[in-house]
Image (cartoon, grey):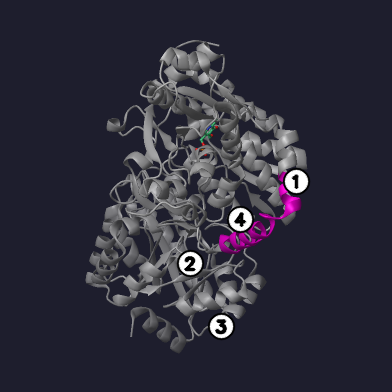
Amino acid sequence: MSRLSATFARLQNEGRQGLVSYVVAGDPSPSGTVGLLHQLVAAGADILEVGVPFSDPMAEGSVIQKGHERALANGMSLQGVLDIVTVFRQEDQQTPIIMMGYANPIERFGYEAFAAAGAKAGVDGLITVDLPPEEVDAIDTALKAVALDNIFLISPTTPTARIETIVERARGFIYCVAVKGVTGSGNLDANEVARNVAVIRSKTALPVAVGFGIKDAASARAVAAVADAVVVGSALIDAMVRVTEHEPAATESQVHAAAVALLESIRLGMDSSPS
Amino acid sequence: MTIEITPELFASVPDAHGRFGHFGGKFVAETLMSALSDLEALYARLKDDAAFRREFDTDLAHYVGRPSPLYEASRLSDAIGGGRIYLKREDLNHTGAHKVNNTIGQALLAKHMGKRRVIAETGAGQHGVATATVAARLGLECHVFMGEEDIRRQSLNVYRMKLLGAEVVPVTSGSRTLKDAMNEALRDWVTRVDDTFYIIGTVAGPHPYPMLVRDFQSVIGREARVQSLAQAGKLPDALVACVGGGSNAIGLFHPFLQDTEVAMYGVEAGGKGLETGAHAAPLSVGSPGVLHGNRTYLMQDDDGQILDTHSVSAGLDYPGVGPEHAWLKDIGRVNYVVANDDEALAAFHRLTRVEGIMPALETAHAMAYAERLAAEMSPDEHIIVNLSGRGDKDILTVAAIEGIEV
Ligand SMILES: Cc1ncc(COP(=O)(O)O)c(C=O)c1O
């Protein structure tokens, strides 16, 4: 069983919802990312989503955009992200890792080369924001060959007929985008999310994770009531940025601690949800 | 690549997936996919609809002022002493560039979709002005995304847009130029996809944009073909146009693609010289990749990160290019060449002084190459240059480069 299936099976047995944390590899520093990932797991993350920095992250709001910019300024690259996963796996063989990024760095690396390197490093799945089903054949073939899950986004604007074609291709889980907008947008409407998740569930038995716009324990709890997992990204990065803004001389462990504290509070909020 | 060039070949692209050979496609976030399908369906229905065509043609005639003249630049041609240079005067269009042909078309589509809000990205500000203009005319809310660097160097156009009632949104991410403006426009569109129509300013972006912008701009080449036959008694021997995203170039080239005796030159921005890396010439020295919704030639590093570009002209300062150009390069139908900043500036002055026509700095790149080409041709041959825009917007830039305070 893949790490992702095992994780969702375990969560179901425990009657809990999964927590997915997103940070950008190389932000705030390349040398700190592996440690941050371990800390996020300790704070309650069930699945790690690792952002692959790109010069033109067109689906990201300003918080994650700036994370990409910092990571690139720090010299992070796709190979660098794979190296981070490799090191992480030396100590943690259980927690699934999803890489999330954009098509061009992967195209440049080569789909087959990337799939092979990803599998070897211990990556479990891939979300490529700008590879909708229409453009995904080539990479899908490469990922399938090494049993890496290709994870698709379904958005509030995705028509039902299209949901059917997406779930046919999807593996691992479905990533349900909570809002029309970029990452970090506000105004998540829990009722709308519930309706969208229900439609997705009527089309697939795959677990459904909900992300975009989840900032705190309250919004996570609202979403966890209908989803199998909740994704938190911009809020974690924002928490770290605030530390440095407030105290430019803050140490890296102080910066990481802010993300860890937020994730812990979200975990607590979710687990106390009357689900 | 060995592809036989037949008339049918050029009518066959893009295919149903929006591909021009390997290039093009729809590489966008899921949230935009249904908006793109809606646009595709609407355009498929309206494209050959007589009433829609009439509306478009009427606007082009009475609002834009088409057909634009084909002018023989006699004094310039005499001075060079080679082939004759004809200028397709898109600078005489309302708002001063070819951009308005496309914004008229897309605004009609927005109207048919019932969208009350339009957005656009702009580099030189010409597309922003052309969008703000049609928005004013139709009473639409208009937001134009523009890199901070471009706001600085195209300040006259920024004020024009504001006078027209548009909001100019400064973009501070990345290199603060056209590519970042396009990222920001795409982000806005994702957020407001229900009530917003994105008027893309060139033949780039996801399908169906490269196709529909090409179709709207092809009026340039259709007119030029008739005018060349009437005025010179034959088809041109060569066509020359500058290439930013490639809309004025494809507009001129497309109706001539099947005429294999017509040579074509797309002129990219050589900036400070290709060898310096400070340029905007993805077709000349880039490699294929995915950006802004399509696969095309890009300026990128080994890690697939998009590189910063440089050009004296904001409208050419873009690391990608429309996918149809990528395909035309690979099949060998169009030659892509460069003109550097200083060559463009020299051509700007020459056309201004010799013909009394002040071209946009983008256009000046095409002029620079056309002069070189004409010198190698004989007087019974002729070139048509797409004079894509007028240079008023660039006066402050030129003055600053030359150390003159205006
Ligand atoms: C006058 C003029 N010519 C050319 C361009 C380049 O665009 P394209 O390559 O799409 O024609 C611009 C863009 O701003 C422009 O303003």
Residue B172: x and y, percent?
A: 50, 39
Q: Foreground: B204 or A47?
A: B204
Chain letter of disc 4 in the image: B
Marks 2/1: CA distance?
A: 33 Å
Q: Foreground: A61 or B99?
A: B99
Q: Give the structural element (helix, strand or loop) at label 3.
A: loop
Chain letter of disc 1 in the image: B
Residue identified by numbered label 3? A203
Magenta region includes residue A164 = no
Type of residue at label 2? Glu
Most distant residue in the front direction: B233
Q: Give the range drawn in magenta.
A: B32-56
Marks 2/3: CA distance?
A: 19 Å
Q: In the image, is the residue at mark 2 within 8 Å of ligand 1 by its beta carbon?
A: no
Eyeballing the image, is B111 above or below B378?
below
Residue depth check, mark 4 versus mark 1: number of the one nearer the observer? 1
Type of residue at label 4? Thr
Residue identified by numbered label 4? B191
Most distant residue in the bottom direction: A13
Which of the labelled discs sits on residue A134, or is there none? 2
Type of residue at label 3? Lys
Residue B133: x and y, percent?
A: 70, 35
Type of residue at label 1? Glu
How many numbered dots are placed on residues in this image? Answer: 4
> Taking B66 as reference, is B267 left or right?
left
- The residue at 37%/68% (across/down) is A138
Q: Foreground: A67 or B386?
A: B386
Marks 1/3: CA distance?
A: 44 Å
Question: Does the residue at mark 2 contact the one at mark 3 (Cβ under 8 Å)?
Answer: no
Marks 4/2: CA distance?
A: 22 Å
Q: Do labels 4 and 2 share a chain?
A: no
